[in-house]
Structures are given as C-alpha cells and as structure tokens.
Image (tube, grey):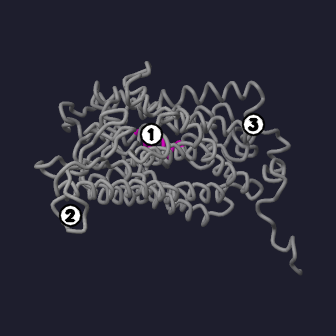
Amino acid sequence: MLSEIPATNKMPSPVVLVREPISMVVSLRGCPGPGSRLTWSGDVEGDARLFAEKTIETFYFWTGVLMWLIHAGFMIYEAGVARQKNVLMTMMKNLLTCAVITPTFFLFGWWIYYAFQGGVVPDTGAAAVAALPWSEVMGPNLDDNITGVFWFAFLLFSFTTGSIMSGAVIERIRLGAYLLLAMILGSVVWILAAAWGWSSGAWLYTEYGFHDWGAGGCVHTVAAAFTLGVLLNLGPRIGKYDDQGRPLEIPPHNLPMTMLGLMLIFTGFYAFYAACAVFQVAEPGADPEPWRSIYGTPMTLGSLAFTVTMGFAGGAMGAFITSKGDPYWTISGGLAGMISIASGVDVYHPALGYLIGFAGGALAVFVGNRLERRGIDDAVGAIAVHGGAGVWSMLAMGLFASGYPQHEILSSLKGQLVGIAVMIGVGFVPGYLISLVLERSGLLRVSREVELAGLDVAELGIEGVVPAGAIGEKT
C-alpha cells in the first residue's frame, strides 16, 4: 500500500509521478502498453509512487525468471516419459522450443497481441505501432523500463504453449517439423487468442464478458487443441496399439524423474499466475487498489495463493481416486487442478477452488483414457491435462461466477461458451491444417527405421543414456 511506504530525506527532490506516453497512452485497465514511461514533477507522494512502480517492475521481471522453472520442469518431465533411446532428443526439442519462439515472438508475436484485440483486422493505433520490432521502446530505452519486462513475461507464456505440444508428440516427430509447429503456435496462434480474449480491449471480453483470468483458454486450451490437430496427422508411436487396435502401455522409462519435473512445473506456475496479476499505482488522493486482473477488475495476491494451492490439492486427489492410485495420473492431476481454476482465480472462494480442481483432476484421467482408446497417442496426456482442464476452467467460470461485474460488463455462461468455441477453433484448425500439409509432404514423421532405432542415435548421433558399464567401468 502506498501509505505504508515512508518518505525519507534520502529520497530525491519532492516530485509527482506522471505517466507520459512515448508512443501511446497507458491504460488503467490491463497491462501497461508498450512505450509507457515515468517522469518526475512535484511532491513527496510522487517519490513513494515511483518507488512502488520500480518495485513492481522488478516483481514482473522475476516472475519471468521464475517461469523458466516451468520449462526446466517440462524438459525433465518429458525426458522421464520418453524411452531411453529418445531421452536426449526429447530434451533438445524442449530447449529449441525456447530458441525458435524467442526471435519470432520479438519480430511479430508481440505486435499481434496489440494489433488484433478488435478482431481479424489489424489495428494501426499507437499501441500496435509501439509493439513493432523497430519501435524505439523495443530495446534499451532510458525513458521506458517496463515494455521489455512485460514482453519477457508474455514470451514465457509463449514457451509454455510450445512445451505443452512437445510432450505429446515425442519419439516420432521430425525435429524441423516440430520447430515449425512450435513457432506458429507460440508466436502466432496463442497470442492471437490472447488478443481476442485476454486483455481489457479483447472483443470476447468487450462483446461477451468472457473472463479467463489465468489463461486457461488462450494458453492451455489453445495449445491442447493445436496439439490434437497435430496428433491426428502424426499418428501413434510404433507398438502403442496391437493388431486389433487395442492400446498397449508404454510406461515412462523413469517415473521419479517425471514426477520431479512436474513438481518444478507446479513451482513455476505460481510465477505464471503472479504475472497474470496487474499492478496499479493509485492516483494522488485515491484509495490504494494496486492489484487488478488483466481485464482491470480488482483482485488480491491472496486469492492467487489460496485458490491455486487449493486447486492443486483438489486436482491431485481427484486424479488419485479416479485413477485408483496411479502415480503418474495423480501428479498430473495436480497440474490439471491448477489449470482448472485458472479462469476464475480472482473470484473463487478457496473451497470452491478445491472442488473445481478435484473435478478437473478426475476429468483429466477420464479424457486421457478416452483419447487413448480412440487411437490418439498423446504420450504425456497433454490434451487431457491442459485441454480438458482448460475447457473446464472456462466453463466453471460461467457456471459459478456468471454475473460477476467487470466494470460495465457482466461475466456470463454464454460468454464463456463462446470463448470455449473460439479457443478450440483457433487452436485446432491451424494445428490440423499445417500438420496435414507436412504429413502429405513427408516432412512430419521420421521413418520407421529411425523410430525403431531411437532418435538419439539416428538423429543426433549420440546415446542420451549410456548403459552402465559401457564406458570406463570394469565388470
């Protein structure tokens, strides 16, 4: 609270904090746009306000840093699921996901977010212009300390979408095809969905009252729908189904490694959600109200701490019961629970968060088993965990929080249903069509010989896991 920040004689001359646009006016709702800056002009309270602003810049920077734990976790998690002959390629794929999305998100992904909030026709206003890669604020600029920090946070969200797809397609996709798909998903598809549904200017919000506080739709559902489209063309791993089409188990080669990876993902997701909370510095004389959703509605960090943790606990228990104690699905259910509460973290009571998470964990097990029986080989259950729980997240917001006031707009079940349809369509259509072109061109899947030999040796020329006694050991 600003009133708790003491003014001391060690501060600079008395000033008033004023936001001045370099290339746009900063909105009081949602994230500050690219190009906002801080200047000094008059009294002691301004010092405290500038201190608060600098603190929050640091806060957002470190949320981005801590979100790297999500991707360290995905790397470890997927490597544990893969068979030994594919461990190194699985980890390389995760590393290169970040490497290919970063430059493309800088070149056009950030611009898409600001240019398409009104629909399919790009906006040419100041916000969109400031997000272009040659803008003066898209680089070192002493007048702008926040644009790069918010770009960094959104970039880490982009990595998450690629990592969601990564695990589902392991052990048989060509590296080049995967990187192309990851780039399109991470730098075009999800950020277009975010522009449409995850900002105060998004048409799904302004026209329908769509509410998706923690990106259960634009990150998780979109990535899962995209992945489903890819899997339909990629096909299952060799040996996953018998001659009658019945699914066979391909267990993780290292289940403890997989569980450790998911624990890191859980930790990183607290930073993910913290980055979804927008800080607002109160105007002089106004009541302090520093935290808001990306739609500009008031919230607290306490709601995040309560509800995300309760959602995790409910999801793990729901999956534990439904899967009859299966360790893999139990810990995956914890993640499903954290995703299930995403859309309404800012408004749910913790007890409701637990129940929604419980249902999400149980749903993930059900969806995963159904997809497997339908011939869809999702190696890590990404569609069940991120897609099933993501859709449930948006639906639950409509069921339990319809009528929640969002300025002059009310949330509604209708708005959530429209949002669900849009998020699934935006993800599935490009995922299916682009992978279909790659499949018809012979560029999507490795050959049978390569798949049987393992991608580590066949594609990378090195064993990712060297058997004990193979080198330098006496037997």
Q: Using residue 197 as the reference point, say whether residue 411 is left or right of it.
A: left
Work out whether mark 3 precedes mark 2 in sequence or the reverse, and give the earlier one: 2
Work out whether mark 1 precedes mark 3 in sequence or the reverse, and give the earlier one: 1
Asked if residue 357 can be seen in this view, the reply is yes
Q: Is residue 122 depicted above or below 251 in this figure?
A: above
Q: Mark 1 points at which residue?
A: 137
- Separation of residues labelled 2 and 1 (CA atoms): 30 Å
- Separation of residues labelled 1 and 3 (CA atoms): 41 Å
Magenta highlight range:
383-391
Q: Is residue 47 magenta?
A: no
Q: Mark 3 points at which residue?
A: 445
Q: Dots 2 and 1: beta carbons under 8 Å?
A: no
Q: What element carries label 1?
A: loop
Asked if residue 354 can be seen in this view, the reply is no
Circle 1: residue type: Val
Q: Residue at x 29, y 50 (%)?
A: 279
Q: Assess disc 2: are there few (<14), some (14-19) or many (≥20) residues with their C-alpha within 10 Å of its C-alpha.
A: few
Mark 3 vs mark 2: in front: 2
Q: Name the residue under label 2.
A: 5
Q: Assess disc 1: are there few (<14), some (14-19) or many (≥20) residues with their C-alpha within 10 Å of its C-alpha.
A: many
Secondary structure character of the magenta stretch overall:
helix
Q: Is mark 3 on a helix, strand or loop?
A: loop
Percent of width and height locating residue 78: 62, 54
Percent of width and height locating residue 175: 72, 42
Mark 2 vs mark 1: in front: 1
Query: Which residue is the extreme one toward the top?
Result: 121
Mark 1 vs mark 3: in front: 1
Percent of width and height locating residue 470: 87, 70
Foreground: 150 or 81? Answer: 150
Q: Is mark 2 on a helix, strand or loop?
A: loop
Q: Residue at x 25, y 68 (%)?
A: 10
